[in-house]
Image (tube, rainbow, N blue to C red):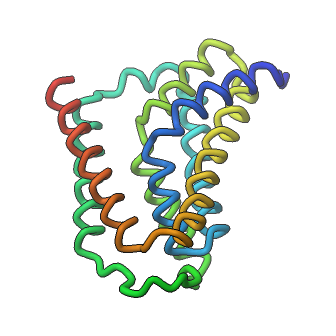
Amino acid sequence: MFSLSTAAVVFGVIFLAELPDKTALAGLLLGTRFRASYVFAGVAAAFAVHVVLAVAAGSVLTLLPQRPLQAVVGALFLGGAIYLLRSKAEEDEEIKEPSSTSFWKVAGSGFTLILVAEFGDLTQIMTANLAARYEDWLSVGVGAFAALCAVAGIGILGGRALLKRVPMRLITRIAACVMLVLAAWSFYEAVVG
């Protein structure tokens, strides 16, 4: 049976844990380049997969080997930073409508990015632990999914608002630097454990 109080507790915990995470950064970047609704559809679908996996696996996800997982995440961040630094940013200051690339291409990009980057993430493991603790897969799943989508929405909409005030080149450079820091941190965690 669905418990609103359990869903609310899970929402709060997952929202606070995910807010400073890479999802907001990914949403911000994708939201500045593509139609926000397309990006959100892909990101939300990836989160649905993650929540289903976490709830189904319960606390088993905490047994995944963290060092190799952190090394893969670090490599993905490093690759993303290199891509951003090598890509040619928009030269003019004029605000442009995000790319009108097809829904499936944009949603697929958002889905793939989040699916890979968030696998084994703290919030996925927390969702699994909460599902094991409360033994209420529906309430935990709804709360976690709503929290993850809320953070992604903030990132995507924040990217659009930011683009109106800050040049795309600067956003891209800052995002690349943040990704380099996240890559270094992930590699550090992979080595140190």
Q: Residue at x 61, y 76 (%)?
A: 103
Residue 165: image location, x then y, percent: 52, 69
Q: Residue at x 54, y 74 (%)?
A: 34
Q: Residue at x 36, y 86 (%)?
A: 91
Residue 172: image location, x then y, percent: 36, 67
Q: Quadrant of residue 101?
A: bottom right
Q: Residue at x 46, y 63 (%)?
A: 29
In this picture, residue 122 sits left or right of residue 71: right
Q: Give the total number of marks visible in the rendering.
A: 0
What quarter of the picture does the N terminus occupy?
top right
In this picture, residue 98 sits left or right of residue 166: right
The residue nearer to you, when weighing 122 against 112, is: 122
Q: Tell which residue pokes out farthest to the top in this image.
A: 133
Residue 77: image location, x then y, percent: 29, 52
Is residue 169 positioned above or below 193 on the image?
A: below
In this picture, residue 65 sits left or right of residue 107: left
The residue nearer to you, when weighing 97 against 55, is: 97
The residue nearer to you, when weighing 182 against 44, is: 182
Is residue 10 positioned above or below 97 on the image?
A: above
What quarter of the picture does the C terminus occupy?
top left
